[in-house]
Image: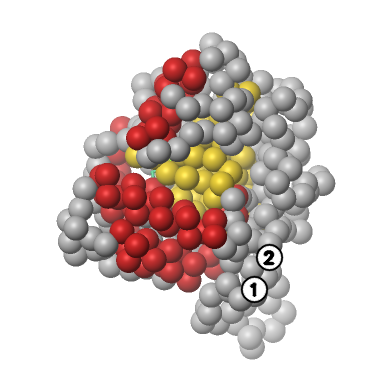
Amino acid sequence: MTDVHELAAVLDEAARTARAVPRPEQDYGVADAYRVQEELIRLRLERGDRLAGVKLGFTSEGKRRQMGVRDIIFGRVPESSAILDGSYADMSRYIHPRVEPEVVYLVGRRIASPGDALAPDAIAAVATGIEVIDSRYEDFRFSLPDVIADNTSAAGYAVGPWQPYDPSRWNLGVVLEIDGRVVHAGSTGAILGDPRRALAEAARLALRAGTVLEPGWVLLAGAATPAEPLTPGARVRAEIQHLGSVSFTASAPEPAPEAPGSAPRASGSVSAQGSAPRAPGPVSAPGSAPRASEPVSAPGSASKVPGPVSAPEPAPKAPGPEAPEREGS
Ligand code: OOG
Ligand code: MG
């Protein structure tokens, strides 16, 4: 069996330096893969990152077919990967990123078992999200244990304005746009056949991974459509019927030094993910994600209110002792 600590360190380094690594040569099982993921997250938290929540993957047939896998997977969402709604995503942090639309739930109470997921206050709010996935493996190719070990390719996420959760609205239209053009369309009913199952599924997988869901965390329910490559300069927008929209722009490539009059980088290489010139509204301090008890904006209102996740500052990858050496930056 692959050494858990060794593989976690390799994948952690690949994520920190945005350099792909080959798949592990030895085969290992799903249980070991979750151990690697746990160790990988432990390394991040040790550097000062925090968990913003959890995610499910391969909950829709479209995604399973795209990636050639069969099972649902569970991953953790680090706070440092947040991208503010209406802001920029720092492309220098990614290897070969893709974007996909997500239903995002705001966890309303501590969820320690699938039963807890049925409590009336289990979901405090819901929003449209975009996830950036970026496999740390070469060519974005992996087995099921590989992708679990790699924290389910989690690399970034943006959340639109929270909406009150109405369980009767579960099968909703979804579109993903790049530069104003619809690249994928689907419906939230593709998520587990019914996205209302997502929290119980997350609780079940969390329990198996020996963890619980905390109030105020996000849950990314898994993309309802296949993912789309994210290229520098692209403006990405996702909209879910009745839940509103969320968008961001992928930072443009570094201008060539001698190119006269070239535009400055869209997001400075020093910025934490999501800290950007166009960040709408006041940016809350780290750790001030609204708790479930805080008011949730009414549908249709406050389209410029950023999601609950603040721009983490300092992000673990900000310059400093932890800053990776990147060529050309
Ligand atoms: C794994 C991540 C899957 C989803 O929403 O299905 C995922 C991958 O496709 O690399 O996040
Ligand atoms: Mg996803």
Q: In which quarter of the image is the C terminus?
A: bottom right
Q: Does residue 1 appear to the left or right of 13 in the view shown?
A: left
Q: Where is residue 155 in the image (x, y as percent from the top left)?
A: 49, 54
Whether residue 19 can be seen here: yes
- At x 44% / y 17%, what residue is drawn? 115
- At x 21% / y 48%, what residue is drawn? 29
Q: Indicate whether 182 appears above or below 134.
A: above
Say whether disc 1 or disc 2 marks the residue closer to the N-terminus.
Answer: 2
- Residue 169 or residue 72, whichever sits in front: 72
Whether residue 232 can be seen here: no
Q: Indicate whether 316 appears above or below 107.
A: below
Q: Which of pointers 1 and 2 indicates the residue nearer the eye?
A: 1
> Which three-letter amino acid code belongs to the residue tagged 2?
Ser
Mark 1 neighbour class, 10 Å CA radius: few under 14, some 14 to 19, many 20 or more: some
> Which three-letter amino acid code belongs to the residue tagged 1?
Pro
Q: Does residue 163 appear to the left or right of 36 in the view shown?
A: right
Q: Where is residue 320 in the image (x, y as percent from the top left)?
A: 64, 75
Q: Quadrant of residue 125?
A: top right
Q: Does residue 275 appear to the left or right of 36 in the view shown?
A: right
Q: Secondary structure under badge 2?
A: loop
- Residue 257 or residue 191, whichever sits in front: 191
Q: Quadrant of residue 139?
A: bottom left
Q: In which quarter of the image is the N terminus?
A: bottom left
Give me the C-alpha separation between circle 1 and circle 2: 9 Å
Q: Indicate whether 240 appears above or below 156.
A: above
Mark 2 neighbour class, 10 Å CA radius: few under 14, some 14 to 19, many 20 or more: some
Q: Secondary structure under badge 1?
A: loop
- Residue 39: numbered disc: none
User: Which residue in the structure is indicated by mark 2?
Assistant: 271
Q: Position of residue 163 (x, y in %)?
A: 66, 25
- Residue 319: numbered disc: 1
